Image (tube, rainbow, N blue to C red):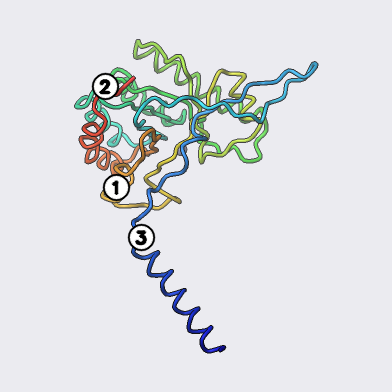
Amino acid sequence: MKQLLKCTCFVIISLAVLFVSISPIPVNAHPLVPIIFTQPPIEEGSTTTVSMKIIFDDITEPFIITVDDGYSRPALKELIAIKQQYGESFKCLLFPYGLALKDNEDLFQQLIKEGCELHNHTYTHMYFRHKTAQQQEQEIMLDDAEIEKVYKMAGQQRPYTKFFRPPGGIYDQTTLQLCIKHGYKIMLWNVITEPNGKNLSVGSRADLIRRAPKGSIILLHSKVSDMDALKIVLPGLIKRYGTQWH
Ligand SMILES: [Zn+2]
């Protein structure tokens, strides 16, 4: 009897392993909900607290390309060329941190003129883990001022909606309070080309972008490998979604 049980267990485990190994690769994406949000303050007597009720924005784009950091000039130049080629066919939001933006103001001005939007990613790329309100506010507002400056230099109007993307996706209640105070919405992502920080090939990065479900916010970094991947997949994405832009 014992032997039979052992044998049955072995068969079940083998079947499970076989099933896992032959199942299609799952789409590497998190649920779409918690990607853009803000939380409204609730007035309680004289103190203001943040409600735990999260208000989600309607994502009306079939996909949004976001590019973080902004340190690589070759990558930024490649993105300018891509934007020149595809124009308004895709929505592109840039999240440079202040120091990188300061170093590459000329290229970011061009990107704005090509239709990209600049948003906030802190000034020094600080991770908001155990950071005081003062530290967080300074990081957000220094980058805000740098973004404002680059828009002025480019002679362009800054977008009405301001997004903040915390480095590493790390934020806390203090961050939420500060975003409300300064009129920011937090934008995270559901697809990333470097899952768990892995340095993937251009082909693998392209696959991750290609498999992004509709409504995705795709996180790329300002690296040539990500720009190369974007160049590969953009024609297909644009063909798939046509002109459903808002
Ligand atoms: Zn970053």
- Residue nearer the viewer, 213 or 36: 213
Disc 2 residue lies near ligand 1 with CB under 8 A: no
Q: Earlier in the sequence, mark 3 or mark 2?
A: 3
- Residue nearer the viewer, 21 or 204: 21
Q: Which residue is mark 2?
A: 88
Q: Is label 1 in a helix, a strand or a loop?
A: helix
Disc 3/disc 2 C-alpha distance (Å): 37 Å
Q: Which residue is mark 3?
A: 23
Q: Quadrant of residue 37?
A: top right
Q: Residue at x 33, y 41 (%)?
A: 223
Neighbours of disc 2 within 10 Å: few (<14), some (14-19), many (20+) = some
| Amino acid residing under circle 1 | Asp
Q: Quadrant of residue 90?
A: top left
The answer to whether residue 147 is above or below residue 165 is: above
Disc 3/disc 1 C-alpha distance (Å): 17 Å
- Residue nearer the viewer, 56 or 104: 56
